[in-house]
Image (cartoon, rainbow, N blue to C red):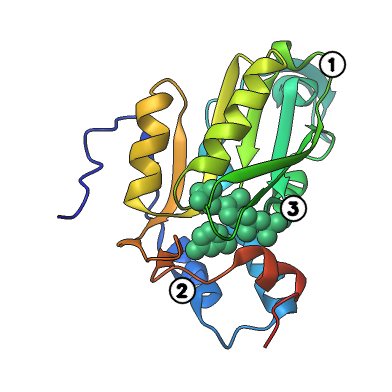
Amino acid sequence: MAIDVSMYKNAIILDHPLLKHKITQIRDKNTKVNQFRLLVKEIAILEGYEALRHLPTYDIEIETPVEKTVQPVVHRKNLCFVPILRAGLGMADGMAELVPGATSGHIGLYRDETTHEPVEYYCKLPENIGDMDVYLIDPMLATGGSAIDAVKMLKKHGAKKITFICIIAAPEGVKAFCELNPDIPLYIGALDRCLNENAYICPGLGDCGDRTFGTIVK
Ligand code: PRP
Ligand code: URA
């Protein structure tokens, strides 16, 4: 039976037509590496625009060609983007374009091919992460194992305010993530049907890390 995720109020499924259009393009197996990477960056910008809607601002004084005025700007220093390596790096390019000057952390995880469990291999986060608004980014939420582990790592390092942004999610991953993290907003570009026997998202886009970096073995 299909998993219903409508009860998870922290799961926000975005529905902008441009986002849908670009996600269709990255799903297409004929989309080549360069184009794929550019699209992932553009998708991150569109999703980031929504996810950063609640960013705090403060006022500064500037001068327009007409007069002096006090106007809002965002608090860039309190913002930390954390891509899950490798595939998250493609999205990180887009987030950095949206807010140049934001801090970045990195978490390295890969899924074991047999167990589909995440394996940690890298973690570098800012020391003051506890004071920051942290945006964890990874294009794929499949079983949810990687995102759940990454949140544990962030919390272990003191992160308190976390948001997760992904491009394509399986209902299985949404359920697993939201049941453990009901307090973490989860932004989703597209909610797919299910996982297959290899824990790949259907219809999905295949292996996002391989498609981003051209490492697919044919
Ligand atoms: C992909 C993806 C996620 C993970 C999602 O990474 O970028 O991190 O799989 O799967 P899960 O929800 O079942 O944990 P992958 O393990 O392929 O590593 P890579 O990005 O280095 O290729
Ligand atoms: N990781 C991917 O890159 N794709 C999937 O479909 C599942 C996990």
Q: Earlier in the sequence, mark 2 or mark 1?
A: 2
In what element is the residue under mark 1?
loop
The yes-or-no answer for disc 2 within 8 Å of ligand 2 is no
Image quarter in which the N terminus is found: bottom left
Alpha carbon separation for disc pair 3 and 1:
21 Å
Image-based side of 157 in relation to 46, left or right: right
Q: Quadrant of residue 82?
A: top right
Locate residue 38, reporting x and y percent: 70, 69
Q: Nearer the viewer, mark 2 or mark 3?
A: 3
Image-based side of 130 in relation to 187, left or right: right
Viewer-proximal residue, 74 or 60? 74
Alpha carbon separation for disc pair 2 and 3:
20 Å
**Measured along the vertical axis of the image, is residue 19 above or below residue 92?**
below
Instruction: Check disc 2 and report the residue beneath it.
Output: 24
Instruction: Check disc 1 and report the residue beneath it.
Output: 127
- Asked whether the residues under the numbered discs 2 and 3 touch, taking CB atoms below 8 Å apart as contact, a structural biologist would say no
